[in-house]
Amino acid sequence: MPEFEDLTNLQVPQALEAEQSVLGAILIDSACVGEVVGILKPEDFYLRQNREIYETIYRMFSYSQPIDVVTVLGKLKENGYYDEAVTPGYLRQLMEITPTAANVKYYAGIVRDKALLRSLSRTATDINEMALKGEGSASSILDSAERKVFGLRRGNADDELERINTILVKLYSHLTELSQSDEDFPGLSTGLRDLDKRINGLNKSDLIIIAARPGMGKTTIALNILANVAKNSGKTVAFFSLEMSREQLASRLLSCESCVDNKNLSTGKLDQEEWNRICVASLALSKTDIRVSDNPMISVTEMNAICRRLDNLGLIVVDYLQLMTRADKDGRPAENRVNVVAEISRALKIMAKDLNVPVICLSQLSRAAESRTDKRPMLSDLRESGAIEQDADQVIMLYRDDYYDKNSPDQNVCECIVAKNRHGEAGTVKIQWMPQFFSFSDLDSVHQG
């Protein structure tokens, strides 16, 4: 009978010795806590007693309180986790059975792995129940299942409330990382210095809308940003084009990277110097991890599913919002376009949050600006839905005066009008437009003056 009970216990993934070793290491050397809190949460401990001790230590770390066997005992009493006959002796035992604090990260990894297996088991049960009940279409159940599994991979359960002290620990780690960085802004660089300063770079989980009338350079600036992130961050970047083919996009990227006139590139009339530049540019682009889709019928749900399977994802670009389609629950195309765009906009923001990467989505503007004397776009010009403005963390609208006035003094100058900015002030940044290379760059000192 005892053997049967032991076998039953093994059915639940656990590592009690590793749990005890983590706690013992912390009690031996409190400097270990900083390494452990980034790996383990209190609920990762299987044994209730171990979970209560770690939760107490976790809170103490959040408030920068000294951590040792005496202070932990005191806090356990305050929290109601104290048993005079058991607790003091158990803490001493934890310190005695732990050979060294040096291996704490290894022990923490074991505990986290077992916790993940338990979560995976619960998630599998939930998915099985959803499939058996058949509530909703197979596609919606599959999407929900993928979200649950992806949530486990990220270490987050999408249906749980998180304690503020846990959030503060993460924020503290993030602030420490920022303080040690040489960058002037926290996000990924767009490659445009003044725009980076205005929007604080491209930040994780942000939805950035780049909007303009046709011909202003939406796709060009998006490709420029994509290439810059891919080259300088080493991360995987994904471009979903609903309008242009993969080959057209590659041609634009190559023209920009090589500084070869796109007209020459499209006709193949290239001199030797241009061929040399194209070879160098091709080599540079080949070293990046840029992924391109030109499926014109792709949905946000499908984008999300594809991107979940990408390792080291850094940025997603979608070109463009008004071309996207979304079907209602019974599979028929939704008729109200305003509602459809609102649903897509919201889904894009959720995708940015789920994947924890910036998502840039291009958007058309209405013709309202064309009838105004000052044709600079405004937020009210966002086409088909005010929900775009609501969901976006930043809205950047492009305007070139020489597009409307051929005699404008601002020839080949583009205004990036930051109309909404959750990371700072709104305002306008001017950049250089180089149409022959499908490229934007910072203005030189002459233009800036």
Image (tube, helix red, strand yellow):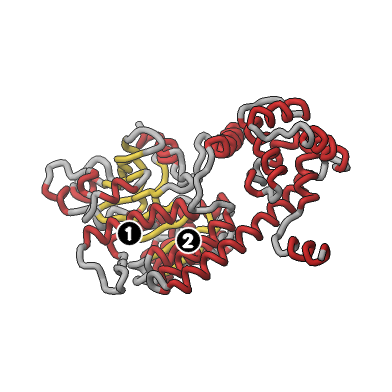
x and y percentages locating residue 218 in the rendered image: 33, 54
Amino acid carrying label 1: it is Ile
Nearest the eye: 138 or 332: 138
x and y percentages locating residue 448 in the rendered image: 36, 34
The residue at 33%/67% (across/down) is 243
Badge 1 density bin: few <14, some 14–19, many ≥20, Cα 10 Å: many
Q: Which of marks 2 and 1 is in front?
A: 1
The residue at 33%/55% (across/down) is 345
The residue at 26%/71% (across/down) is 333
Badge 2 density bin: few <14, some 14–19, many ≥20, Cα 10 Å: many
Nearest the eye: 4 or 176: 4
Q: What element carries label 1?
A: helix
Amino acid carrying label 2: it is Ala
Mark 2 sits on what residue? Answer: 238
Give above or below for 17 relative to 36: below
x and y percentages locating residue 37 in the rendered image: 66, 40
Q: What element carries label 2?
A: strand
Give above or below for 75 relative to 134: above
x and y percentages locating residue 190 in the rendered image: 46, 46
Mark 1 sits on what residue? Answer: 344
